[in-house]
Image: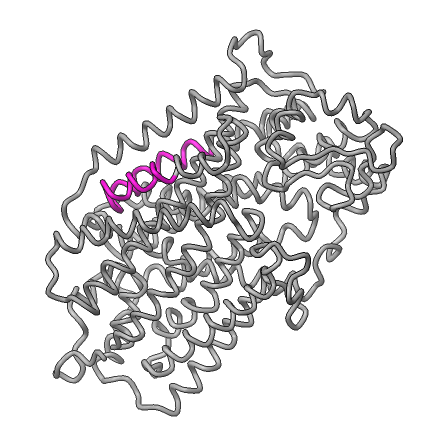
Amino acid sequence: MIGAVPTVAQLGWGVDRWSLVLIVGTLIVYFGIAILMHVTDTDDFYVAGRTIPASVNGMSVAADWMSAASFISMSGLVATLGFDGTIYLMGWTGGYVVLALLIAPYLRKYGKYTIPDFIGDRYYSNTARGVAAVATLFVSLTYIAGQMRGVGIVMSRFLGLPITQGILVALAIVAAIGVLGGMKAITWTQAVQYVVLIIAFLIVTVAISLNLTGNPFPQGALITSQISERLAQLQTDVQMGRYFMPFTEYSQLNVFAIALTLMIGTAGLPHVIMRFYTVPSASEARLSAGYALFFIALLYLSVPVLAIFAKFNLISTLHGESVATAQQIPWVSRWMETGLLTITDSNGDGIIQMSQGLTASASEVFVDPDIIVLSTPEVAGLAPIVIGLVAAGGMAAALSTADGLLIAMSSAVSHDIYYKIFRPEATQRERLIVARVVILIAAVVAAYLGINPPGFVGEVVAIAFGLAAASLFPPILLGIFDQRMNKEGAIAGLVVGLSFTLVLVALMRANVVLGLEEPFLELFLGVNALGVGLYGAILNFAVALTVSRFTPAPPTAIQEMVQEVRLPRGSRTVATDEPVQADGGEPPVE
């Protein structure tokens, strides 16, 4: 084992005590913010009164977007998948650039509350609004399932709670924050959560870099210590294959499809796009996007480094060790209790052989990718306070995104469906009551999905990105840049893209959800469930453009509004909370 820095004796408390103090302490802080930010106004509830500074919004966007998938799962996926795992880094980072340049400033200038709000008014149709709201619910519920799996893992390992109870406790806190303070409380909570998660991630990465290489700068350590070459040689020695060889886990087509799906899916995520409505102007939205990219880069530039460190430590610690001895190592026994780490003696020689890798069913050591980051400080022998801080960081990452997802679902139902479609005369008080009830209902559904997730955290989140890519991204992009796009095209594309992707994902993940031995469908045209959203997006674009060209053009007022939204100067809000008028007549809403 690698020596502890500093020693346990110097700190006094063990892992369990530090984890309890740091996790519970941060949860109390988050709840305190919600109480201080209690809101009674719909503008504060949905968009934080549009008063959030760009720097704070940048931290909130970073926390909202990175989620448990980035903090908990991504390094694990890169560690287990090798080169192919970097598609998550490329896809999510590239997607944020698309969002910042092509989507966020224009939607902020338009000045609505939600994505369904934009789609409903841009396409002068309550049907379009309703379909977009349904798509928001599908995307958000899938996404939140991944966050709740992350919460369950942290709670079960570090607080000793069963996964089910841990998820229920965490969701109760998240729901309370949303109910009390809406977007205003969630924004400031997420800013604090970002600070917690980034400190945790960077501290563990720097500490392990010092232990392994003597270099406190992890990225520089890759060059000066030749740790990459050492890992590659170590994998060769234990017959685990070539870590840096591309297209060993996924085909070249699949890598391309997943990366592009994650990119355009990022630009269609309703809970992230909503964040840009909270700043005072379009220029502030663009500035907050720059801040967010910087804050995201701090973690994302460290992810592949930590993945290399983590895998090197795991192989060095366990390969060639006796099975009996390994099972008595404290961190091994504790993670085995969660069922996310197993050690078996398949060939009966009493010695651990890791030639089958870390995630294959035949492996003598099976490591769930979602525990690699959380377990790495223990594997490296770091101090209990560092281990507890990583646990608190993982919790912060999961809860920050869960906060945003609950408010996105709440807004879609209370504002876009209840108020805009069924009850336009509803008072602010009625709308706030509905919004808060929806948060509670969504939390219950999220708890079920978290207890029965359709895959690893990163995989579940990738599926959510695919649903966003296939449903919301095309009508948003076309709504900004294609004046000829009409309601018929947008609705048709939305329905076809979302339905197509949902069906294929269900067929490909039926074995996980239903407990079957094999899925109904492994690949569709060479692409798996993580990348099939690209085909859904292509279908959405094709149907929308075709239908729009064979049906009447949008009203003149709509076309002028689209042109106004794209004007580079000024940050004047184009739309109000009233429906767009067509040619001076009544609102052309179905």
Relative to 422, 482 lies left or right: right
Residue nearer the viewer, 277 or 174: 174
- Which of the image's four quarters has the N terminus? top right
Is 359 in front, or is 65? 359
x, y percent for residue 114: 29, 60
In the rendered structure, does residue 175 fall within the stretch colored magenta? yes
Quick check: can you spot residue 258? no
Rendered image coloring scheme? one colour
Q: Nearer the viewer, residue 290 or 327?
A: 327
Q: Residue at x 74, y 46 (%)?
A: 361
Mark yes or no: residue 442 visible.
Answer: yes
Where residue 572 appears, x then y in whole percent?
A: 20, 62
In this picture, which residue range is highlighted in magenta? 171-198
Question: Compared to 77, does 464 lie above or below?
Answer: below
Quadrant including the C terminus: bottom left
Q: Position of residue 88 (x, y in %)?
A: 58, 52
Q: What x and y, as percent, mark residue 360?
A: 74, 46
Q: Residue at x 36, y 78 (%)?
A: 491
- 548 versus 330 height, above or below: below
- The picture quadrant where one finds residue 55 is top left
Residue 49 among magenta residues: no
Q: Residue at x 58, y 28 (%)?
A: 206
Closer-to-camera residue (92/570): 92
The kind of secondary structure the magenta stretch mainly shows is helix
